[in-house]
Amino acid sequence: MRVWRSIAEVPADLGRTTVTIGNFDGVHLGHQHVVRRAREVATEVAAGVGSERVVVVTFDPHPIAVLRPEHAPPTLSTIEDRLALLEKAGADDALVIPFDREVAGWSPEEFIDRILVGALHANAVVVGANFRFGNRAAGDVATLREAGESRDFAVEGIALDGGPQVWSSTYVRNCLAAGDVEGAAEALGRPFTVTGTVVEGDKRGRELGFPTANVPTTGVAAAPADGVYAGWLRRLDTGVRYPAAISVGTNPTFDGERERRVESYVLDRTDLELYGVEVEVSFTARLRGMVRFEGVDALIDTMKDDVVRTREILKV
């Protein structure tokens, strides 16, 4: 996939394209449907001469993070993960628009003329039926269709997928906030994952017989609700994947800890050296909520039960 980080990077000799536009946070099944339809449209409009290239237009950072940072939602995917998922869904190229207040002030007509017509030479535009764009979200699918009539591009609005609750990034975040990683996976079409570099922790897990790979969470990235989960840990340097019991939270049994972390105990392994290794933690099912235990013995007994249930769920 070719990735352009500004309008100036788009090749001047880029031919006619089929364009789809959105934040695409998480690239859930609804997003994937839109990109696949863009792929089909690209083939249809270029009938007889081969398929046009499908260009995805997205924004970084998320517009709300610029316009109303206090209300910015936790992100489901980094921009790099988003691009990889969009390519897998069928996109050929991506234009990542650095979103700032200047871009936020563009009228719908200015966005159309700068991006769709001037930079990408759109032959067709495929978006979700609820797509809004331009200053104060003044533009919609009808705006695009009206502009397309005079600027020579077709427009298709795709009905939203899912039901009774349609799939959306907000829906996925709500699932995660409730600890419903299975609901999030259904909407994403894959398990939800957290990626990060393993850091050295307090080593309490090792002392208890359950050494963990600790990945800090951040205030801008989404993570499941505090609790214990069954899932998998994958080393991104080697690709090796391990079954794991995963704790998300601050370890309330031990006083003084405030940093929220994703801690993965790889089943039956006490020999792994993962400090400094980038890993991907994927969540399969929730085992229980986070509990403050009165003593270490009760904690260990519960952790043993967590491991048994993790084996059952993962069938390992």
Image (cartoon, grey):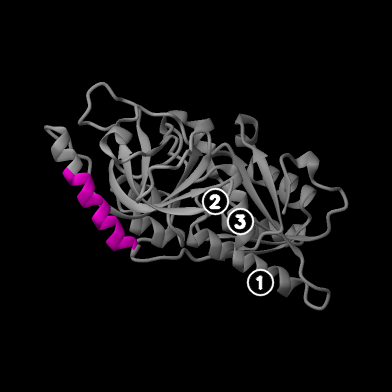
Tell me whether the residue at label 2 lies in contact with that at label 3, contact meaning CB atoms closer than 8 angstroms: yes
Specify few, some or many for label 1: CA neighbours under 10 Å numbering under 14, 14-19, or 20 or more. Answer: some
CB under 8 Å between callouts 2 and 1? Answer: no
**Quadrant of the image occupied by residue 311:** bottom left
Q: Secondary structure at mark 1?
A: helix
Residue in the foreground of this view, choosing between 103 and 182: 182
Side of 274 relative to 291 (left or right) = right
In which quadrant of the rendered image does the C terminus lie? bottom left
Give the residue number, with chain letter if any, for mark 3: 86
- Residue 250 point in image, percent of width and height: 29, 32
Label of residue 273 in the image: none
Q: Is residue 134 among the parts visible in the rendering?
A: no
Q: Residue at x 61, y 31 (%)?
A: 100
Q: Position of residue 67 (x, y in %)?
A: 51, 32
Residue at point 43%, 57% (across, down)? 191
Does 189 sit left or right of 150 as displayed?
left
Q: Amino acid at mark 3?
A: Leu
Q: Amino acid at mark 1?
A: Glu
Question: Could you tell me how far apart the alpha carbons at marks 1 and 3 are, in whole angstroms?
Answer: 15 Å
Give the magenta part as a residue range. Answer: 301-314
Q: Is residue 77 above or below residue 185?
A: above
Closer mark to the observer between disc 2 and disc 3? 3
Point out the residue furthest to the front here.
271
In the image, taking residue 209 as reference, residue 138 lies left or right, namely: right
> Which is nearer the N-term, disc 2 or disc 3?
2
Estimate how packed mark 2 is, as few (under 14), some (14 to 19) or many (20 or more) residues with alpha carbons within 10 Å: many
Mark closest to the chain's N terminus, 1 or 3: 1
Q: Badge 2 is on which residue?
A: 24
**Which labelled disc corresponds to residue 40?**
1
Choose between 214 and 1: the one closer to the eye: 214
